[in-house]
Image (cartoon, rainbow, N blue to C red):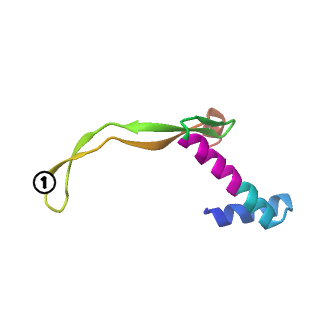
Amino acid sequence: MNKLELIEAVANETNLNKKDVELVINRALATIASKLVSGDVVKLTDFGTFAVKTRQERNGTNPQTKQKIVIPAAKTVGFKVSKGLKEKL
């Protein structure tokens, strides 16, 4: 499911206008993103938790040249599924 399909599904289930649903979903995603950028953890009850994680620097190999390289440390977003959602799966 992509974002457009999500908007359509929510609009159909709630009988709300697609434009209104799109606005709410876009705003919710923007808020989650801004909280993650500022270093906060976003917990959605019965869904899961989004948090910024740091990957350590590591060694790797360039697949084209087989040359050894160092992959720098990087930040990424992690997601942990809630117990309630995990049980439903």
- Point 85% across, 62% down: residue: 16
* Residue 56 vertical placement versus 20 (above, below): above
> Could you say where residue 22 lies in the image, as x and y percent from the top left?
73, 62
Examine the image and state in which quarter residue 72 appears. top left
Q: Residue furthest right?
A: 15
Quadrant in which the C terminus appears: top right
Q: Which residue is mark 1?
A: 67
* Residue 31 vertical placement versus 1 (above, below): above
Range of the magenta residues? Answer: 26-37
> In the image, is 20 to the left or to the right of 55?
right
- Point 64% across, 40% down: residue: 85
> Could you say where residue 76 lies in the image, as x and y percent from the top left?
44, 44
Quadrant in which the N terminus appears: bottom right
> Could you say where residue 8 lies in the image, as x and y percent from the top left?
74, 66
> In the image, is 68 to the left or to the right of 39?
left
**Judging from the image, what secondary structure is the residue with disc 1 in?**
loop
